[in-house]
């Protein structure tokens, strides 16, 4: 099955991805920026809401946007999700699959060099994927490659990957920040520690939770990408400090704006605010293996005790869409538009508590703005809304530093966020499949797990759509995830920064901004 026919066979999927491409609003020079020719040179600085002193460069432990952006800067993946949602070649120039989508062959781009001069080879791709495999792997992406039964070289420029079952979307998975390509050591292990990749920038300094510094790779293979001479990623977790850094010119761009002041920022001379409607969503995951959340009636009460519309307006100031306790929205293919929207219903919540043998229940909700800007305020608002439902919530404000290593997946109920993924299978596999490293509710539903495997290899699109619709229903009604809303990606740049069409695959132009953006005057 050649690549072109593979994409044609998934025409419904591609149409859905394109239809869900970014809706971008940019004040000021948006149209000019999109049409402008990139300028080479200059120094670029990004102020991130992310970063932790526990950060490491291990591709299997990418816990925040600062890390994923670093990997995308210093190296490449085999494939890339373009700004229109289509899958395009990166280090793989083409790919083929057997008719059952179980065996995939990727042809590698010739002449690609690592920053130290080593030529990219099949051994590097194999080591980069094997890094996430095996029962002893600590990688968060282990579930995404668990179906791989064999990976081998076929000559000097092809890698053949065999799966235990068909996966029509497998090349999409390999575009993820979880699968950057680094060099293989002689023993087959992966040499990622120094950030020596094949990407547009060389890593010259990395201070976990503080900063990452880059200089241009003069031998980068990709013409038309990697325009800056040098760049910095700077962790500025406090939103006020981050905004002031942009206002004063200390940085050239920031993410995660304080939404209540966004309209004022739009009026500031020299600053351009961009807003992209996409797949990022904020959640409150409950551990389904821990009392009282091990009772689905309690979980349903928690979901019904939330006023989503009020939270959307209060926390996001309308910069998003209400959620429905499952991660697939209309930006994805196979979105279940028939799934009834859950609403605030304290009386029904109390009914569910009674079914669990409770008149009321005391709960602790851990939150930090490390999860998302406004997470603590959202937790406090949740507390007030849930009182009518018999839910007595104590909000525990957690430190921002170390939140992802010490709170998330450790405490039984907390605040979280998820970026967009290319396909429903990717987010379901990484966050909802039984045993997945990032299954932050520890949910294990046999029907869901079976459907997940079946849908991957199903080539009949209407039947596949039915499967994904049922999976969305199962997550909504039985999983431990509360999804109050999907958040627009709202970020700001200096008007000295040029951007093109923006992606909604992940936040901030799919985390590929260091490759795609430029300084208008170098």
Image (cartoon, rainbow, N blue to C red):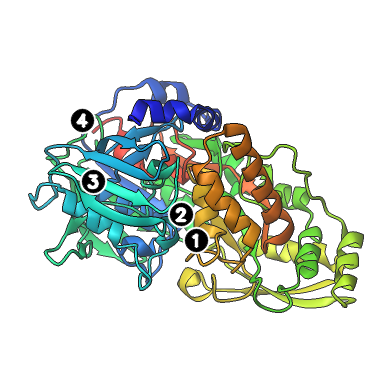
Residue 256 seen in this snapshot: no
Q: Earlier in the sequence, mark 2 or mark 3?
A: 3
Residue on which the image places disc 1 = 238
Q: Are marks 2 and 3 in contact (CB under 8 Å)?
A: no
Q: Label 3: how many residues lie within 10 Å, few (<14), some (14-19) or many (20+)?
A: many
Judging depth in this view, the residue of 365 and 114 nearest the camera is 114
Residue on which the image places disc 4 = 223
If the image is split into quadrants, where does the C terminus sit?
top left
Is label 2 or label 3 in front? 3
Farthest residue toward the left?
Answer: 117
Q: Earlier in the sequence, mark 1 or mark 4?
A: 4
Q: Are marks 2 and 4 in contact (CB under 8 Å)?
A: no
Which element carries disc 1, helix, strand or loop?
A: loop
Which element carries disc 2, helix, strand or loop?
A: helix
Q: Are marks 1 and 4 in contact (CB under 8 Å)?
A: no
Judging depth in this view, the residue of 162 and 201 nearest the camera is 162
Which element carries disc 4, helix, strand or loop?
A: loop
| Residue 340: image location, x then y, percent | 79, 44
Q: Quadrant of residue 195?
A: bottom left
Q: Earlier in the sequence, mark 3 or mark 1?
A: 3
Q: How far is disc 1 from disc 4 in space, using C-alphas? A: 36 Å
Q: Label 4: how many residues lie within 10 Å, few (<14), some (14-19) or many (20+)?
A: few
**Residue 242 - label:** 2
**Residue 159 - label:** 3
Q: Quadrant of residue 363?
A: bottom right
| Residue 161: image location, x then y, percent | 30, 49
| Residue 517: image location, x then y, percent | 33, 36
Name the residue at 86% across, 66% down.
352
Q: Are marks 3 and 1 in contact (CB under 8 Å)?
A: no
Q: Quadrant of residue 368?
A: bottom right
Q: How far is disc 2 from disc 4 in space, using C-alphas? A: 32 Å
Q: How far is disc 3 from disc 1 in space, using C-alphas? A: 44 Å
């Amino acid at each position: 099955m050649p690549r072109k026919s593979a994409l044609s066979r998934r025409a419904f999927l591609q149409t859905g991805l394109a239809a869900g491409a970014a809706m971008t609003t940019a004040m000021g020079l948006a149209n000019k920026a999109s049409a402008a020719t990139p300028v080479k040179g200059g120094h670029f600085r990004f102020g991130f809401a992310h970063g932790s002193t526990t950060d490491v460069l291990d591709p299997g432990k990418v816990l925040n946007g600062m890390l994923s952006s670093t990997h995308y800067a210093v190296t490449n993946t085999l494939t890339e999700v373009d700004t229109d949602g289509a899958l395009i070649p990166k280090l793989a120039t083409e790919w083929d699959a057997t008719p059952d989508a179980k065996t995939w062959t990727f042809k590698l781009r010739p002449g690609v060099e690592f920053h130290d001069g080593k030529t990219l080879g099949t051994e590097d791709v194999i080591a980069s994927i094997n890094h996430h495999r095996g029962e002893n792997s600590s990688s968060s992406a282990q579930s995404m490659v668990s179906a791989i039964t064999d990976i081998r070289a076929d000559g000097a420029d092809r890698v053949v990957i065999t799966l235990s079952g068909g996966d029509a979307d497998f090349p999409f998975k390999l575009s993820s920040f979880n699968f950057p390509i680094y060099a293989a050591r002689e023993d087959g292990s992966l040499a990622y520690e120094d950030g020596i990749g094949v990407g547009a920038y060389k890593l010259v300094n990395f201070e976990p939770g503080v900063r990452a510094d880059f200089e241009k790779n003069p031998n980068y293979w990709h013409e038309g990408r990697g325009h800056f001479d040098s760049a910095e990623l700077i962790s500025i977790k406090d939103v006020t400090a981050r905004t002031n850094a942009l206002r004063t010119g200390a940085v050239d761009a920031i993410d995660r704006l304080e939404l209540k002041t966004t309209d004022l920022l739009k009026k500031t001379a020299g600053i351009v605010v961009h807003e992209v409607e996409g797949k990022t969503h904020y959640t409150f995951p409950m551990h389904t293996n821990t009392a009282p959340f091990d009772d689905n009636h309690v979980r349903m009460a928690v979901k019904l005790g939330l006023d989503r519309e009020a939270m959307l307006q209060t926390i996001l100031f309308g910069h998003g869409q209400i959620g429905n306790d499952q991660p697939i929205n209309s930006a994805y293919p196979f979105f279940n538009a028939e799934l009834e929207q859950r609403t605030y219903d304290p009386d029904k919540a109390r009914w569910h508590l009674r079914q669990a043998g409770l008149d009321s229940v005391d709960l602790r909700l851990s939150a930090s703005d490390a999860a998302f800007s406004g997470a603590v305020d959202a937790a406090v608002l949740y507390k007030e809304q849930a009182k009518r439902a018999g839910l007595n919530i104590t909000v525990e404000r957690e430190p921002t530093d170390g939140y992802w290593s010490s709170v998330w997946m450790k405490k039984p109920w907390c605040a979280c966020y998820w970026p967009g993924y290319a396909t429903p299978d990717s987010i379901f596999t990484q966050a909802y499949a039984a045993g997945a490293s990032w299954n932050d509710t520890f949910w294990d539903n046999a029907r869901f797990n079976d459907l997940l495997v079946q849908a991957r290899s199903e080539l009949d699109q209407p039947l596949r759509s039915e499967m994904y619709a049922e999976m969305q229903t199962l997550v909504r009604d039985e999983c431990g995830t509360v999804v109050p809303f999907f958040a627009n990606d709202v970020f700001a740049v200096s008007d000295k920064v040029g951007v093109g069409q923006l992606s909604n695959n992940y936040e901030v132009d799919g985390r590929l901004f260091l490759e795609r953006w430029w300084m208008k005057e170098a």
